[in-house]
Image (tube, rainbow, N blue to C red):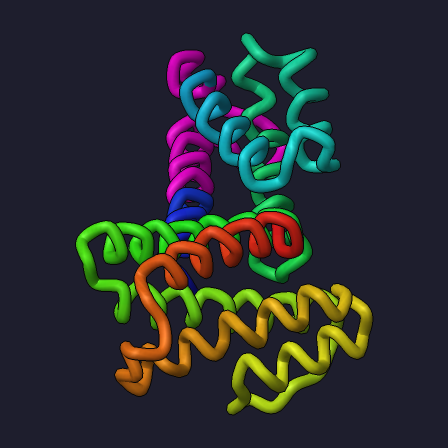
Amino acid sequence: MNIATETIETKFQALLEEGQDILHESGWDGRKYYRHPSSIDYQRWCAEAGNLIFRVCGKKSVHYAAFERIMAQGVLNSYFLKDCIGVLQGAYNDFQDGFLIEIRNLIRAELLDDFLSQAEMLLEQGYYLAAASLGGAVLEDTLRKLCDKHSIAYPERTKIDTLNIELARAEIYDKLVQKEITAKADIRNNADHGHFDKFNSQDVEDMLRWVRRFVSEYLE
Protein backbone atom coordinates (compact mmCIF):
# COMPACT_ATOMS: atom_id res chain seq x y z
CA MET A 1 0.00 0.00 0.00
CA ASN A 2 1.49 3.38 -1.00
CA ILE A 3 1.50 6.55 1.08
CA ALA A 4 -1.41 8.19 -0.73
CA THR A 5 -3.59 5.12 -0.35
CA GLU A 6 -2.69 4.84 3.33
CA THR A 7 -3.66 8.48 3.86
CA ILE A 8 -7.10 7.92 2.35
CA GLU A 9 -7.52 4.69 4.29
CA THR A 10 -6.65 6.45 7.54
CA LYS A 11 -9.08 9.29 6.85
CA PHE A 12 -11.93 6.88 6.14
CA GLN A 13 -11.25 4.96 9.34
CA ALA A 14 -10.97 8.09 11.46
CA LEU A 15 -14.24 9.57 10.19
CA LEU A 16 -16.12 6.29 10.55
CA GLU A 17 -14.81 5.84 14.08
CA GLU A 18 -15.68 9.42 14.99
CA GLY A 19 -19.16 9.05 13.51
CA GLN A 20 -19.81 5.92 15.53
CA ASP A 21 -18.58 7.68 18.67
CA ILE A 22 -21.03 10.53 18.08
CA LEU A 23 -23.85 8.03 17.58
CA HIS A 24 -22.90 6.24 20.78
CA GLU A 25 -22.79 9.47 22.78
CA SER A 26 -26.24 10.34 21.40
CA GLY A 27 -27.68 7.04 22.60
CA TRP A 28 -28.46 5.63 19.15
CA ASP A 29 -29.77 2.09 19.61
CA GLY A 30 -30.30 1.19 15.98
CA ARG A 31 -33.81 2.62 15.89
CA LYS A 32 -33.85 5.92 17.75
CA TYR A 33 -31.67 8.47 19.51
CA TYR A 34 -31.73 9.24 23.20
CA ARG A 35 -30.91 12.78 22.05
CA HIS A 36 -29.96 14.09 18.62
CA PRO A 37 -26.22 14.53 17.97
CA SER A 38 -24.74 18.00 18.38
CA SER A 39 -25.45 20.12 15.28
CA ILE A 40 -21.90 21.47 15.40
CA ASP A 41 -20.37 17.99 15.46
CA TYR A 42 -22.78 16.80 12.77
CA GLN A 43 -22.10 19.62 10.33
CA ARG A 44 -18.34 19.47 10.83
CA TRP A 45 -18.32 15.71 10.37
CA CYS A 46 -20.51 15.93 7.27
CA ALA A 47 -18.25 18.57 5.73
CA GLU A 48 -15.22 16.32 6.14
CA ALA A 49 -17.04 13.18 5.03
CA GLY A 50 -18.55 14.88 1.99
CA ASN A 51 -15.17 16.23 0.97
CA LEU A 52 -13.58 12.79 1.29
CA ILE A 53 -16.31 11.10 -0.76
CA PHE A 54 -16.08 13.81 -3.41
CA ARG A 55 -12.31 13.53 -3.71
CA VAL A 56 -12.12 9.74 -3.61
CA CYS A 57 -15.26 8.70 -5.49
CA GLY A 58 -15.89 11.70 -7.71
CA LYS A 59 -18.79 14.07 -8.16
CA LYS A 60 -20.67 11.67 -10.46
CA SER A 61 -20.36 8.63 -8.22
CA VAL A 62 -23.36 6.93 -6.62
CA HIS A 63 -21.80 7.51 -3.22
CA TYR A 64 -21.52 11.26 -3.64
CA ALA A 65 -25.01 11.45 -5.16
CA ALA A 66 -26.42 9.60 -2.13
CA PHE A 67 -24.59 11.92 0.24
CA GLU A 68 -25.91 14.96 -1.62
CA ARG A 69 -29.48 13.66 -1.39
CA ILE A 70 -29.15 13.37 2.39
CA MET A 71 -27.69 16.86 2.63
CA ALA A 72 -30.51 18.26 0.51
CA GLN A 73 -33.04 17.29 3.16
CA GLY A 74 -30.96 17.09 6.32
CA VAL A 75 -28.01 19.47 6.19
CA LEU A 76 -29.24 21.10 9.42
CA ASN A 77 -30.82 17.99 10.93
CA SER A 78 -28.35 15.83 12.83
CA TYR A 79 -30.87 12.97 12.80
CA PHE A 80 -29.42 12.04 9.41
CA LEU A 81 -25.94 11.35 10.76
CA LYS A 82 -26.67 7.62 10.78
CA ASP A 83 -27.52 7.75 7.06
CA CYS A 84 -24.39 9.72 6.23
CA ILE A 85 -22.27 7.16 8.07
CA GLY A 86 -23.86 4.43 5.97
CA VAL A 87 -22.92 6.20 2.75
CA LEU A 88 -19.36 6.77 3.95
CA GLN A 89 -19.08 3.11 4.93
CA GLY A 90 -20.23 2.07 1.47
CA ALA A 91 -17.65 4.33 -0.18
CA TYR A 92 -14.95 2.92 2.09
CA ASN A 93 -15.94 -0.66 1.29
CA ASP A 94 -15.70 -0.01 -2.44
CA PHE A 95 -12.36 1.73 -1.95
CA GLN A 96 -10.99 -1.25 -0.02
CA ASP A 97 -12.32 -3.74 -2.57
CA GLY A 98 -10.64 -1.89 -5.43
CA PHE A 99 -13.82 -0.83 -7.20
CA LEU A 100 -12.87 2.84 -7.34
CA ILE A 101 -10.59 2.44 -10.33
CA GLU A 102 -10.36 6.12 -11.17
CA ILE A 103 -8.95 7.13 -7.81
CA ARG A 104 -6.50 4.22 -7.89
CA ASN A 105 -5.22 5.43 -11.26
CA LEU A 106 -5.10 9.00 -10.01
CA ILE A 107 -3.01 8.00 -7.01
CA ARG A 108 -0.64 6.08 -9.23
CA ALA A 109 -0.30 8.98 -11.63
CA GLU A 110 0.35 11.42 -8.77
CA LEU A 111 3.06 9.18 -7.34
CA LEU A 112 4.72 8.84 -10.73
CA ASP A 113 4.59 12.61 -11.08
CA ASP A 114 6.37 12.94 -7.74
CA PHE A 115 9.16 10.63 -8.88
CA LEU A 116 9.48 12.48 -12.18
CA SER A 117 9.77 15.74 -10.26
CA GLN A 118 12.56 14.19 -8.20
CA ALA A 119 14.32 13.09 -11.41
CA GLU A 120 14.02 16.61 -12.84
CA MET A 121 15.47 18.05 -9.65
CA LEU A 122 18.41 15.65 -9.82
CA LEU A 123 19.01 16.70 -13.42
CA GLU A 124 18.95 20.38 -12.48
CA GLN A 125 21.59 19.67 -9.83
CA GLY A 126 23.81 17.96 -12.38
CA TYR A 127 23.12 14.34 -11.42
CA TYR A 128 21.97 13.27 -14.85
CA LEU A 129 22.95 9.61 -14.37
CA ALA A 130 20.68 9.29 -11.35
CA ALA A 131 17.96 11.28 -13.11
CA ALA A 132 18.05 8.93 -16.10
CA SER A 133 17.89 5.88 -13.85
CA LEU A 134 14.90 7.23 -11.92
CA GLY A 135 13.14 8.37 -15.09
CA GLY A 136 13.58 4.88 -16.53
CA ALA A 137 12.11 3.34 -13.38
CA VAL A 138 9.07 5.58 -13.76
CA LEU A 139 8.71 4.51 -17.39
CA GLU A 140 8.93 0.83 -16.46
CA ASP A 141 6.35 1.22 -13.69
CA THR A 142 4.05 3.06 -16.09
CA LEU A 143 4.28 0.20 -18.59
CA ARG A 144 3.43 -2.29 -15.85
CA LYS A 145 0.40 -0.26 -14.86
CA LEU A 146 -0.69 -0.04 -18.49
CA CYS A 147 -0.49 -3.83 -18.73
CA ASP A 148 -2.58 -4.13 -15.56
CA LYS A 149 -5.09 -1.59 -16.87
CA HIS A 150 -5.57 -3.53 -20.11
CA SER A 151 -5.35 -7.03 -18.53
CA ILE A 152 -2.11 -7.89 -20.33
CA ALA A 153 -0.19 -10.66 -18.59
CA TYR A 154 3.54 -10.35 -17.98
CA PRO A 155 6.17 -12.19 -15.88
CA GLU A 156 6.76 -10.91 -12.38
CA ARG A 157 10.42 -10.34 -13.18
CA THR A 158 10.52 -8.49 -16.46
CA LYS A 159 12.03 -5.41 -18.08
CA ILE A 160 10.93 -2.47 -20.19
CA ASP A 161 11.59 -4.25 -23.47
CA THR A 162 9.23 -7.15 -22.71
CA LEU A 163 6.47 -4.86 -21.47
CA ASN A 164 6.95 -2.62 -24.50
CA ILE A 165 6.58 -5.52 -26.92
CA GLU A 166 3.40 -6.79 -25.25
CA LEU A 167 1.76 -3.36 -25.16
CA ALA A 168 2.59 -2.64 -28.79
CA ARG A 169 1.33 -6.09 -29.78
CA ALA A 170 -1.96 -5.32 -28.04
CA GLU A 171 -2.05 -2.01 -29.98
CA ILE A 172 -2.18 0.10 -26.83
CA TYR A 173 0.14 2.43 -28.73
CA ASP A 174 1.72 2.45 -32.18
CA LYS A 175 5.17 1.49 -33.47
CA LEU A 176 6.50 5.03 -33.20
CA VAL A 177 5.77 5.09 -29.46
CA GLN A 178 7.29 1.61 -29.12
CA LYS A 179 10.46 2.88 -30.80
CA GLU A 180 10.64 5.90 -28.48
CA ILE A 181 10.28 3.65 -25.42
CA THR A 182 13.11 1.44 -26.68
CA ALA A 183 15.32 4.50 -27.01
CA LYS A 184 14.45 5.71 -23.51
CA ALA A 185 15.12 2.23 -22.14
CA ASP A 186 18.60 2.35 -23.69
CA ILE A 187 19.34 5.59 -21.84
CA ARG A 188 18.17 4.05 -18.58
CA ASN A 189 20.27 0.91 -19.13
CA ASN A 190 23.37 2.96 -19.91
CA ALA A 191 22.81 5.02 -16.76
CA ASP A 192 22.37 1.92 -14.62
CA HIS A 193 25.64 0.47 -15.96
CA GLY A 194 27.61 3.69 -15.72
CA HIS A 195 28.05 4.18 -19.47
CA PHE A 196 27.97 7.96 -19.17
CA ASP A 197 29.78 8.38 -22.51
CA LYS A 198 26.75 7.05 -24.41
CA PHE A 199 24.32 9.85 -23.45
CA ASN A 200 24.36 13.34 -22.02
CA SER A 201 22.25 15.62 -19.83
CA GLN A 202 20.27 16.91 -22.83
CA ASP A 203 19.29 13.32 -23.66
CA VAL A 204 18.04 12.89 -20.10
CA GLU A 205 16.12 16.16 -20.21
CA ASP A 206 14.41 15.05 -23.43
CA MET A 207 13.75 11.64 -21.86
CA LEU A 208 12.07 13.05 -18.75
CA ARG A 209 9.96 15.45 -20.79
CA TRP A 210 8.82 12.58 -23.04
CA VAL A 211 8.09 10.23 -20.11
CA ARG A 212 5.99 12.90 -18.38
CA ARG A 213 3.94 13.38 -21.55
CA PHE A 214 3.59 9.61 -21.97
CA VAL A 215 2.33 9.14 -18.40
CA SER A 216 -0.17 11.95 -18.82
CA GLU A 217 -1.50 10.63 -22.10
CA TYR A 218 -1.72 6.91 -21.37
CA LEU A 219 -2.16 6.51 -17.62
CA GLU A 220 -4.20 9.44 -16.33
Left or right position of 203 against 165: left
Residue 147 visible? The answer is: yes
Residue found 62% across the figure and 13% down from its top: 74
Q: Is residue 41 magenta?
A: yes
Vertical side of 203 occupied by 94: above or below: above
Q: Is residue 9 visible?
A: no
Q: Residue 34, position in %: x, y?
A: 48, 23
Residue extent of the magenta highlight: 14-42
Q: Residue at x 31, y 61 (%)?
A: 201
Q: Quadrant of residue 187?
A: bottom left
| Side (left or right) of 121 relative to 10 | left
Camera-side residue of 24 and 103: 103
164 relative position to 193: left or right: right
Count of numbered marks: 0
Q: Residue furthest top?
A: 76
Q: Position of residue 41 (x, y in %)?
A: 39, 20
Q: Nearer the viewer, residue 106 or 121?
A: 121
Residue 148: x and y, percent?
A: 66, 71
